[in-house]
Image (cartoon, rainbow, N blue to C red):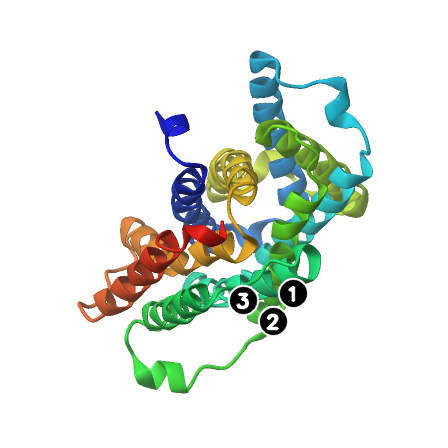
């Protein structure tokens, strides 16, 4: 069914799903971040996700010998995403989930810059307007329509650490299109996961050995399974699928929906519901996405 849709629409639908799944990482991650070292957690995450994607690749028979040429490409992409995920969980040790989501909304602007540097992608006036509206809506949602909270905002250590990770994430997006040589998204994802896992094992070997895996709190295992299956295996495929169909700025613009999804996750986890004024911010993010959907000429 989805294959009958225009490629641009396919990319947008993939990123809509991506934003909802990514949001869960913030809410669950903030509860598990202090119970395990970020490198150990993400090495396990990449390994489990690689097994899942590897099984899919084996079942579909999509992998060909030509797909594994120039393996340095996977090391580059694996390194970029490893830095992002490790710094995300390092930041979540002190940064609240919603505050981290605020930092995440800086990624589209960074991605637009890297998109120009790497691919010479131009951000059209309509797209720039959409990014601005989306940013305003995201900030409104993040601070729960509280102007006093916005005025008093200070960047903490966790937020600063996570920002560095977001820079890595923003660079990853145009690099996927730059380095892809026609490999299917699922195969390219598998290569990235394997490379990322190897790099994290080397980097965090001492922390992996020191982790008492049999006595970790239940929330860590819940978070690990979620981020491996839904926030890694699935979102890796969705992100690479969309990146091959949309400009980098459009792909990362969907991060503006993440704060709204985070609030939904917080409600489901029993952390309370926001006031009605929050819907203004949600409406702005939807308007931004509408403008992006109407700007498919730049895709």
Element type where label 1 sits in the image: helix
Q: Which of marks 3 and 1 is nearer the N terminus?
A: 3
Residue 57's quadrant in the figure? top right
Q: What residue is shown at x 54% (from left), y 67% (from top)?
A: 109
- Residue identifier under label 3: 109
Labels 3 and 1 touching (C-beta < 8 A): no
From the viewer's side, name the closer residue of 84 and 109. Answer: 109
Question: Where is residue 224 drawn, in percent x and y?
Answer: 53, 39
Give coordinates of residue 102: x percent, y percent: 45, 67
Q: What residue sits 20% from the left and 71% below the top?
A: 277
Quarter location, residue 52: top right
Furthest residue in direction front, as rendered: 297
Labelled pair 3, 2 in contact (Cβ < 8 Å): no
Q: Which residue is drawn at 60% across and 73% down?
A: 157
SS category of the residue bearing label 3: helix
Residue 167, position as x, y percentages in the image: 63, 62
The residue labelled by disc 2 is 160
| Above or below for 108 versus 193 | below
Q: Is residue 277 above or below residue 245?
A: below
Looking at marks 3 and 2 on the same chain, the residue that comes earlier in the sequence is marked by 3
Name the mark on residue 164: 1
Q: Say which of 179 and 154 sits in front.
A: 179
Q: Residue 84's x, y, as percent?
A: 63, 54
């Amino acid at each position: 069914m989805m294959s009958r849709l225009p490629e641009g629409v396919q990319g947008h639908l993939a990123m809509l799903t991506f934003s909802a799944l990514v949001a869960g990482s913030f809410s669950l991650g903030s509860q598990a971040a202090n119970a395990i070292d970020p490198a150990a957690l993400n090495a396990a995450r990449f390994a489990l996700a690689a097994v899942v994607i590897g099984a899919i690749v084996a079942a579909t028979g999509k992998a060909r010998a030509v797909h594994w040429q120039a393996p340095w490409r996977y090391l580059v992409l694996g390194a970029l995403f490893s830095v992002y995920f490790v710094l995300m969980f390092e930041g979540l040790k002190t940064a609240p989930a919603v505050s981290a989501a605020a930092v995440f909304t800086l990624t589209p602007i960074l991605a637009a810059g890297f998109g120009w540097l790497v691919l010479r992608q131009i951000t059209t006036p309509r797209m720039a307007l959409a990014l601005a509206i989306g940013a305003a809506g995201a900030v409104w949602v993040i601070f729960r329509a509280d102007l006093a909270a916005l005025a008093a905002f200070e960047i903490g250590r966790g937020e600063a650490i996570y920002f560095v990770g977001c820079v890595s994430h923003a660079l990853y997006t145009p690099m996927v299109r730059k380095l892809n040589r026609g490999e299917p998204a699922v195969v390219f994802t598998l290569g990235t996961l394997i490379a990322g896992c190897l790099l994290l094992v080397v980097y965090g070997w001492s922390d992996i050995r020191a982790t008492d895996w049999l006595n970790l709190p239940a929330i860590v295992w819940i978070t690990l399974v979620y981020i491996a299956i839904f926030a890694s295996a699935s979102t890796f495929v969705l992100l690479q699928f969309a990146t091959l169909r949309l400009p980098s700025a459009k792909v990362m613009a969907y991060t503006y929906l993440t704060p709204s999804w985070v609030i939904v996750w917080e409600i489901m986890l029993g952390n309370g519901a926001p006031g009605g004024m929050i819907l203004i911010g949600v409406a702005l993010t939807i308007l931004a996405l509408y403008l992006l959907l109407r700007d498919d000429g730049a895709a």
